[in-house]
Image (cartoon, rainbow, N blue to C red):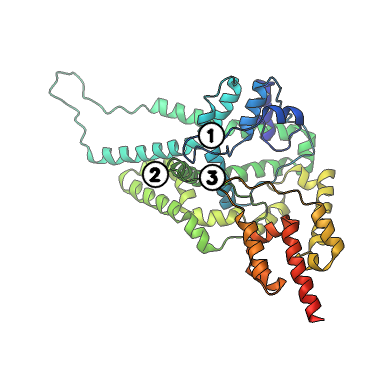
């Protein structure tokens, strides 16, 4: 499906493509000359650095006359996704704020309409969730209202026929069909393309492709309402002025305790149960319509745990479901990457600050790769750097200084040779005294 969508987008956008920031080939001089991001004014969370930057960079490059094109058939590149629902939600908090910030960028002069359309699409990708939730609540309110309102079939006005309640079932069915087509046609086209493409079909087989598509659709239906509420809360937090900050994305899943999953998703479950109870009393037919949505909400906690389950992943991979061709026949560049990762992990496994203090060659190798730290801005003192230096000066030995430091101070220590030199002198002084 991804390739089908990408090729469709490529066809209509032409040279007005989007720059997604990952897996990109760029002219460095053009990017440096044109894609400098502005700092937005006003109040947070709309002000400050643009958190979803690549859409804006593409628009700025196009405004300067450069072409930005998508290459959907380019092989040998990949992007690692967050490994669980909770990690996706954390990442989406920053993306939601970044896309809402695009409301301010849309007013910029000289931007081409496809770039403005990209930004509007990103904005609506998150605003659609509270709109969807609002539609559900409106339907529930109407169901409750119908339960209590007595319909007057005959009024005081002269009429040959009763005033029947109007229920436009034809348009309702049409809307349902159109909605399902928008959601399912890209998936169906992607599956058909995979079946008729030997490159995609042979590693997996037709049966596994079809079963995998069904499994993916099943879980998509269950997870969609959870994301609806997550994104709705993101939007509320953003308009309340809560800043997301910029935290690194999780790539490896270490698991979440059930208590934390309960804290994250208990309100999703309570909303699902509450709506179920209300509709079971006031409108059982509407309950049937909303059943796919409500099942996902009621079981949000176990579904969240399942999203990062390594056991489930191993089972699905063993039976060949939800695999991609690269997992069956691994690409050469991925094999090299895995070997480099394993080698790097082996090399750095035993490297720590104490070894840097003891081994001059290792210490020189480390600081040869450390770039000069940027100068602190006025009014923003380097707290971690100052804290590390103070604790070294106040400690009796290197072990005590390191014990006092938190991780950010240790990072400052490893980034500033002059601070590390103070720790090294303290360490060497203790060695001479012990001898």
Residue located farthest toward the left when viewing the structure as drawn: 156
Identify which residue is drawn at 64% across, 34% down: 54
Mark seen at residue 158? none
Measured Cα–Cα span from mark 2 to mark 1: 45 Å
- Residue 27 placement (x, y as % from top left): 77, 29
Instruction: Classify mark 2: helix, strand or loop.
Output: helix
Closer-to-camera residue (387/181): 387
* Disc 2 crowd, CA 10 A, few/some/many (<14, 14-19, 20+): many
Measured Cα–Cα span from mark 2 to mark 3: 30 Å
Mark seen at residue 93? 3
Instruction: Classify mark 1: helix, strand or loop.
Output: loop
Closer-to-camera residue (102/396): 396
Label located before the other in sequence (2 or 3): 3
Vertically, is 54 above or below 268? Answer: above
* Figure quadrant of the N terminus: top right
Asked where in the image residue 432 lies, by quadrant, the reply is bottom right
What residue did someone put label 2 on? 287
- Residue 101 placement (x, y as % from top left): 52, 35
- Eye-nearest disc, 2 or 1: 1
Residue 323 lies left or right of residue 344; in this view the side is left
What residue did someone put label 1 on? 40
């Amino acid at each position: 499906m991804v390739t089908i969508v990408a090729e469709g987008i490529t066809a209509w956008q032409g040279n007005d493509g989007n720059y997604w920031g990952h897996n990109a080939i760029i002219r460095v001089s053009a990017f440096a000359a044109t894609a400098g991001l502005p700092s937005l004014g006003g109040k947070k969370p709309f002000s400050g650095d643009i958190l979803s930057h690549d859409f804006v960079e593409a628009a700025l490059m196009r405004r300067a006359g450069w072409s930005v094109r998508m290459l959907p058939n380019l092989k040998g590149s990949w992007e690692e996704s967050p490994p669980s629902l909770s990690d996706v939600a954390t990442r989406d908090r920053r993306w939601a704020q970044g896309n809402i910030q695009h409301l301010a960028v849309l007013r910029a002069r000289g931007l081409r309409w496809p770039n403005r359309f990209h930004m509007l699409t990103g904005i609506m990708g998150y605003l659609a969730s509270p709109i969807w939730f609002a539609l559900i609540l409106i339907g529930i309110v109407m169901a409750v209202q119908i339960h209590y309102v007595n319909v007057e079939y005959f009024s005081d006005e002269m009429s040959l026929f009763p005033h029947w309640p109007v229920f436009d079932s034809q348009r309702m069915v049409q809307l349902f069909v159109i909605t399902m087509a928008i959601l399912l046609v890209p998936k169906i086209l992607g599956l058909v393309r995979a079946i008729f493409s030997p490159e995609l079909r042979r590693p997996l087989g037709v049966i596994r492709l079809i079963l995998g598509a069904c499994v993916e659709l099943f879980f998509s239906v269950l997870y969609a309402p959870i994301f609806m509420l997550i994104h709705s809360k993101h939007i509320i937090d953003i308009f309340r002025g809560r800043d997301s900050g910029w935290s690194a994305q999780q790539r490896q899943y270490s698991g979440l305790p059930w208590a934390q999953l309960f804290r994250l998703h208990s309100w999703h479950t309570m909303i699902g149960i509450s709506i179920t109870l209300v509709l079971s009393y006031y409108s059982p037919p509407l309950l049937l319509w909303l059943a796919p949505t409500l099942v996902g909400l009621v079981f949000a906690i176990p579904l969240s745990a399942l999203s990062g389950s390594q056991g489930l992943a191993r089972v699905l991979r063993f039976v060949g479901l939800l695999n991609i061709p690269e997992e069956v026949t691994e690409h050469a560049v991925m094999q090299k990457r895995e070997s480099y990762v394993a080698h790097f992990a082996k090399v750095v496994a035993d490297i720590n600050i104490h070894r840097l203090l003891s081994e001059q060659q290792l210490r020189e190798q480390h600081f040869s790769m450390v770039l000069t730290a940027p100068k602190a801005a006025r009014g923003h003192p380097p707290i971690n750097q100052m804290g590390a230096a103070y604790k070294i000066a106040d400690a009796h030995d290197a072990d005590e200084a390191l014990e006092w430091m938190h991780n950010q101070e240790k990072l400052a220590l490893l980034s500033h040779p002059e601070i590390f030199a103070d720790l090294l002198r303290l360490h060497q002084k203790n060695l001479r005294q012990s001898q």
